[in-house]
Image (cartoon, rainbow, N blue to C red):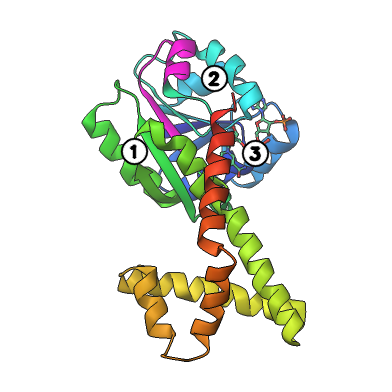
Amino acid sequence: MVIGVVGYGNMGESFARSLKGRAELLVYDTNPGRCESALKEGFGVAKDLEFLLQSSRWLLLAVKPKDAPEVLQRLRGKLKDRLLVSVVAGLSLSKMEELTGSSSLVRLMPNINALVGRATIACAFARGVQEREREEFVELFSSCGSLYTIGEELFDAFTALAGSGPAFVFKFVHALALAGLREGFSYETAKSIAVDVVLGSCELLKQKGGNPEDWLIRVASPAGTTVEGVKVLEERGFVGTLMECVRKTSERAKTLL
Ligand SMILES: NC(=O)c1ccc[n+]([C@@H]2O[C@H](COP(=O)([O-])OP(=O)(O)OC[C@H]3O[C@@H](n4cnc5c(N)ncnc54)[C@H](OP(=O)(O)O)[C@@H]3O)[C@@H](O)[C@H]2O)c1
């Protein structure tokens, strides 16, 4: 199976690397420097979009939103039974269908964690994708991260929660690191501790299950230290602030494209 990657930037490269060994990758990028990087990585490079299209069974569109309409128009009427997979933010399935004339389409919303093969990815299929192809797609693309098949109406909310989510996590880690600095650690040591705490706590939650609140209560002993800190978070509106943060991000996502 050959997957043609249109646009070998951050996302194109991350997905191609994760799919390496499970599919044959062929790349097309208008930037000669990016083509060289693809060659160094051991991927084939197509001289033009037409060659990529002829040689591939599936296409992965990973160009910037401003460049996507032109590429889609060039693919119009030529996709035949090929599956077109897009990671372009804000580009709906109906817009893709309008521009290409095909309904064999998949819309993905990955996040920056794709750079380390740990993306959280939303996935929506257009009506033209058959059940067998859906299953094949999910099996293959699960190597790129955690796939969540959701209704397209939830994509803006997903963009806020998982697309922008890493930025909120980085803010949290930075805040913890600063708090450690204030207490006497170097910033680097405090940051390393904060990263380990976040990674370990998430691993615990993932492996053992349960709700975060159940684990909070196991950490916080009666009249102990942890609950004093939790009270401050409650008083300063930590939960409400985060909920409003995601709501505002989601509203902004709706105004794009
Ligand atoms: N980065 C993220 O964290 C993230 C997260 C979720 C979704 N996305 C989506 O992923 C897509 C790609 O983002 P990115 O950060 O990977 O972008 P990027 O690093 O800029 O990569 C895009 C690549 O495509 C090339 N290109 C431009 N026009 C082209 C064309 N007509 N045909 C073939 N190649 C072309 C660009 O070359 P030039 O540099 O010369 O223009 C560049 O090498 C975007 O639509 C974005 O919305 C990104």
**Numbered disc total:** 3
State the extent of the magenta-drawn residues as a range. Answer: 94-108
Q: Quadrant of residue 103?
A: top left
Q: Which image quarter holds the N terminus?
A: top left
Q: Is mark 2 within 8 Å of ligand 1?
A: no
Dot 3 corresponds to which residue? 9
Dot 2 corresponds to which residue? 51
Labels 1 & 2 near each other (Cβ < 8 A): no
Point out residue 171 in the picture as x, y percentages from the top left corner: 65, 61
Mark 3 or mark 1, earlier in chain: 3
| 199 in relation to 254, above or below | below
| 18 in relation to 215, above or below | above
Does the rendering let one see residue 156? yes
Give neighbour class at mark 2: few <14, some 14-19, many 20+ (Cα, 10 Å). some
Which residue in the rendered view is the most extreme toward the top? 77
Labels 3 & 1 near each other (Cβ < 8 A): no
Dot 1 corresponds to which residue? 137
Inspect the magenta stretch and tell me whether residue 171 lies in it: no
Amino acid found under the numbered disc labelled 3: Gly
Disc 3 is placed on an element classified as loop
Inspect the magenta stretch and tell me whether residue 105 lies in it: yes
Mark 2 or mark 3, earlier in chain: 3
| Distance (Cα) linking label 2 and label 3 | 19 Å
Disc 1 is placed on an element classified as helix
Point out residue 191 in the picture as x, y percentages from the top left corner: 68, 75
Q: Does residue 76 appear to the left or right of 123 in the view shown?
A: right
Q: Which residue corresponds to the image point at 34% horizontal and 34% vertical from the top-left?
A: 151
Disc 2 is placed on an element classified as helix
Does the rendering let one see residue 89? no
